[in-house]
Amino acid sequence: MTKKILTTIILSMLAVSSVFAQPPVPPAQNGYQPAPRHERRQDRHVRGVRGLEWINLTEEQRNEINKLDYDYETKIREVEYRKRGVDYKFEYEREKADIDLATIKDLINQRKDIEKEIDYLRIEKEVSILNVLTPEQKEQLNYGRRYR
């Protein structure tokens, strides 16, 4: 009897130790690890268009881009707020026992129109920001986008 208990204890300890003896989790497959906070290039960061943080911008360009970004993001947030209102109305109509298909169709169309408006504002914002850049900076941006 004691042999059985001793054997089961030893086998369970062996099984538990093999679970804890696993190798450490490997790093990400692409090898990317974010830089520590103090090494990040915060001072050159410009919001608005991806890739601009790698281009040397003048202070005026940075200010203009940040202003455009702020203005467009404000407009986009206002339109998204309208979209949320339509979404609430849509969910309210769907919860009703007597669903009016014409109202549902109208709300779907309103939501799609607002999504189009948001997409257009985002594209317009990016084009406005790109218009601030010089031709050399645009070439740098295109070069960086191709080879990343």
Image (cartoon, rainbow, N blue to C red):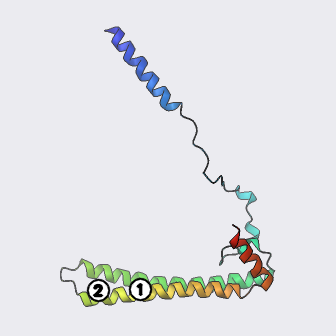
Local crowd at mark 1 within 10 Å, few (<14), some, or many (≥20)? few
Please name the residue shown 74% across and 58% down the image.
38
The residue that disc 2 covers is 104
8 lies above or below 25: above
Across and down, in percent, residue 23 comes to: 57, 35
Across and down, in percent, residue 57 comes to: 79, 78
Q: In the image, what residue type sits under mark 1?
A: Lys
- Of residues 130 and 145, the one nearer the viewer is 145
- Of residues 50 and 145, the one nearer the viewer is 145
Q: In the image, what residue type sits under mark 2?
A: Ile
- Distance from disc 1 to disc 2, alpha carbons, whole Å, reads 12 Å
Give the quadrant of residue 102. Answer: bottom left
Q: Look at the image and tell me in which quarter the C terminus lies.
A: bottom right
Q: Say whether residue 135 is left or right of residue 116.
A: right
Mark 1: which secondary structure?
helix
Across and down, in percent, residue 20 comes to: 51, 31
43 lies above or below 36: below
The residue that disc 1 covers is 112
Extreme front residue here? 146
